[in-house]
Image (cartoon, helix red, strand yellow):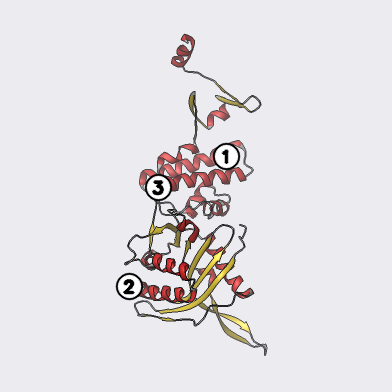
């Protein structure tokens, strides 16, 4: 997956001290971090990791700004451009939400204002620390504490451009495990929106994009579509929720990670946790189209059987095995 170059406008790291079932307190930085090569690598790595993680929720701010102050805080920051004050207010609010969740853990809280070709956003990530091993100047092995960036569990992002334009999906966050991540959703003030029909349509679109990228034979392509349709139809009937990793492994077992990468690409904006809408999976098995003077629907398999033939040179469809009733009506005309 290609990495979109990021321009860091502001960056700061505070600390949230919190043990499970314990109180929360904060340690605030006195100033923003300088934007040097180390800071750039850190932000780039976290943004890339966040972008490739599935299980994200998407939505917009809650309307009650008294209970959910995030939009008011962001609005004030955009007005006065005081990033240090903004970050400190965020930490005070995060402390309150962490106090409300007994199982919440502390860590370093990275807050950044980042711009790239795709968006202008505020990024917040809670990163824990781990003990590694290093060799010092005397060539002795010693413990080294560093950020555990590869196990990002709590993070969120606010797309400022979409929010200011009146869009509907400008906040995203990692869903994580149950209530442990729920407090961070409350911190962001995100009313996550799961629309099964739209999410299923995006899933079908992502699958079609993936199959276009693969050098599959016509038969293999039909088999993938058939597996996908059968799986999603069964899940829709049984009210089973989509997990992108599981879906990818069942639809394309030869290379599930390749399919998962496409399905969880940020451009698609697909989330886990929805029950497939069976109305939206019909395109996996059937073509449906309409023009001012006709409507048409047929199975993909009919292209293989020869019941439907498309001539790209004359841009025409030839239909075979016409039913007697239709044949009679056509002859009468």
User: Disc 1 and disc 2: Cα gap in Å?
Assistant: 50 Å
Pick whichever, 109 or 255, lies toward us: 109
User: Disc 3 and disc 1: Cα gap in Å?
Assistant: 25 Å
Residue occupying image coordinates x 58% and y 39%: 220
User: Which quadrant is the N terminus positioned in?
Assistant: bottom right
Q: Of discs 1 and 2, which sits in the foreground?
A: 2
Label located before the other in sequence (1 or 2): 2
- The reply to whether callout 3 and callout 1 are in contact (CB within 8 Å) is no
Which type of secondary structure does the marked residue at label 1 adopt?
helix
Residue occupying image coordinates x 61% and y 60%: 4
Q: Is residue 246 left or right of residue 41?
A: left
Disc on res. 196: 3
**Residue reaching furthest top?**
332
Residue identifier under label 1: 221
Residue identifier under label 2: 100
Local packing at callout 2 (Cα closer than 10 Å; few below 14, some 14-19, many 20+) is some
Which type of secondary structure does the marked residue at label 3 adopt?
helix
Residue occupying image coordinates x 58% and y 49%: 254
């Amino acid at each position: 997956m290609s990495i979109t170059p990021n321009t860091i406008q502001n960056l700061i790291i505070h600390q949230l001290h919190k043990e499970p079932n314990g109180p929360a307190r904060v340690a605030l930085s006195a100033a923003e971090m300088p934007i040097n090569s180390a800071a750039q690598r850190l932000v780039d790595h976290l943004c890339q990791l966040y972008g490739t993680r599935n299980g994200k929720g998407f939505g917009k701010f809650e309307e009650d700004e008294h209970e959910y102050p995030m939009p008011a805080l962001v609005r004030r920051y955009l007005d006065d451009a005081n990033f240090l004050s903004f970050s400190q207010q965020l930490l005070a609010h995060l402390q309150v939400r962490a106090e409300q969740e007994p199982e919440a853990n502390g860590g370093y809280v990275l807050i950044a204002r980042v711009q790239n070709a795709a968006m202008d956003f505020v990024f917040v990530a809670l990163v824990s620390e781990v003990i590694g091993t290093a060799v010092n100047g005397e060539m002795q092995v010693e413990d080294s504490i560093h950020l555990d960036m590869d196990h990002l569990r709590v993070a969120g992002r606010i797309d400022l451009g979409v929010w200011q334009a009146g869009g509907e999906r400008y906040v995203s966050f990692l869903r994580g495990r149950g209530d442990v991540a729920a407090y961070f959703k409350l911190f962001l003030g995100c009313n996550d929106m799961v629309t099964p029909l739209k999410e299923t349509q995006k899933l079908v679109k992502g699958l079609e994009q993936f199959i276009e990228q693969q050098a599959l034979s016509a038969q293999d392509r039909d088999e993938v579509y058939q597996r996908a349709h059968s799986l999603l139809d069964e899940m829709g009937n049984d009210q089973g929720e989509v997990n992108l990793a599981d879906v990818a492994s069942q639809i394309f077992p030869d290379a599930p990670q390749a399919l998962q990468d496409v399905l969880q690409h940020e451009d698609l904006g697909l989330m886990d946790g929805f029950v497939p809408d069976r109305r939206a999976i019909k395109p996996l098995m059937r073509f449906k189209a309409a023009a001012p003077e006709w409507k048409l629907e047929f199975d993909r398999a009919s292209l293989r059987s020869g019941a439907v033939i498309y001539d790209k040179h004359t841009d025409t469809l030839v239909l075979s095995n016409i039913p007697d009733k239709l044949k009679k009506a056509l002859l009468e005309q």
